[in-house]
Amino acid sequence: MASPAEPSSLDQLLDHQSGVVSRQQANAHGITDNAIAAHVLGGRWQRIHPGTYATFTGPLPRAAQLWAALLYAGADAVLCGPTAAEVDGLIERPREASVHVLVPIHRRVRPQRGIRVHRSRSHAQHGRRAAAPPRTRVEDTVLDLVARATTADQALAIVANACQRRRTTANRLASTVTTRRNLRWRSPVLAALRDIAEGAHSLLEIRYLRDVERRHRLPEGRRQRAVLRGARREWTDVSYDDYATCVELDGRLGHDQVTDAWRDMRRDNRAALAGEVSLRYGWLDVTGRACAVAGEVAEVLRARGWAGQPRRCGNSCCL
C-alpha cells in the first residue's frame, strides 16, 4: 500500500510506517524476496501478516499493529470505526485489540487474526489517505460509532464527546449526517447537534436543556459562561444571568476523590460571595428526577425575579 506522498527512501518509509513494510514496498526499494526471507530467518525481521513485516524484533507497538493491518489490506485501505476513533483521540484504546480497516466494496481480503475488514461503496469519500496512519474522516468516524450505539443516550454522548474534545464541530457533523439517510439515531443526533451548536457540551447538558428547561418551560440559561471570580477564570455550565443563578452539572455517578468534593464546595462558595445562587445536579438527578429538578430551579428563579410559571410536562409530573 503506497500513500499519496510515500517517502522516497526506505529509512524514511520505515520511520513513517512505524518500522513496518510490505513485500511490495521492500521490493521497490531493492530488497528481494530472498533477502526478506533471510532477514526473517536471521531473526532481524518478523512476519506479521502475509506479505507484511516488522523490521525489528520484540513485541509490536500499537502503531506498528495499525500499519501492518493497513499494508496487509492493500492499496487505499484506511483505519475505521473504533480504531480510527482511537487514533484521533475520540476514545481510549478499546478493549478489543482488533484493528478495523475499511476497503473499497470490490476488495476481497483474506481474514487474518487481529484484523476486521469492512467494505464500503463510499470508501473514497470517507477516507483521509494523507493522514498518518490513513483513516476515515473524523466526522465519518464519529457517525460510524453512532451507528454502533445501542441506545440514543449512547449515541448522543458520542457526538457530544467529539465536539467537547474539539475533534470536530456540531456543524460539520450535522453536514455529514445529511449524507447518511439510513443512519441509526439520525433524528435525535441532529436535534442534539443543534443543542451542541448553541453551547451544550455534554450529554448531561443536553438532557438538562431538553428534559428540565424545555419540557417545563423554564428560561433557557446561557451555556458555558466565562466568569472571573477574583483571580480565577471559571466556566459555569448554565447561567441565568438576569436572576444571578447558575447550575453546575456533574456527569460522574459519584465523586471519585475527596478533593473533587472540596473543589466543588470552593466553587460554590465563590459563587455565593459573588452574589449568585449555585445549584448543583448530577446524572441521576437530571435523568431520574427531572421534574423535581425543574421545580427547584423554578423556585430559585422566581425568588430572584422570574415572573414566569413552570409547566407540567405530563400527567405524572410532580410540578
Image: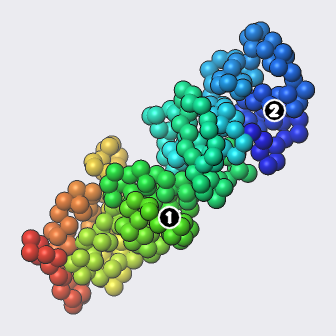
* Horizontal arrangement in the rendering, residue 132 relative to residue 188 (left or right): right
Q: Which percent across, then down, holds residue 50?
A: 67, 24
Provide the residue designation for mark 2: 25
* Horizontal arrangement in the rendering, residue 293 relative to residue 276 (left or right): left
Give the number of the disc on residue 215: none
The image shows residue 170, relative to residue 166, as above or below, that is: below
Q: Which percent across, then down, holds residue 41?
A: 75, 9
Answer few, some or many: residues within 10 Å of disc 1's Cα (few below 14, many 20 plus, some between 14 and 19).
Answer: few
Which amino acid, by three-letter code, is at mark 2? Gln
Which of disc 1 and disc 2 is earlier in sequence? Answer: 2
The mark tally for this picture is 2
Q: Residue furthest bottom?
A: 307
Q: Which percent across, then down, holds residue 256?
A: 32, 43
Provide the residue designation for mark 1: 180
Q: Which percent across, then down, holds residue 199?
A: 44, 72
Q: Nearer the viewer, residue 157 or 75?
A: 75
The image shows residue 228, relative to residue 31, as above or below, that is: below
Answer few, some or many: residues within 10 Å of disc 2's Cα (few below 14, many 20 plus, some between 14 and 19).
Answer: some
User: Mark 1: which secondary structure?
Assistant: loop
Q: Nearer the viewer, residue 3 or 220?
A: 3
User: Mark 2: which secondary structure?
Assistant: helix
Where, by quadrant of the figure, is residue 250 drawn?
A: bottom left
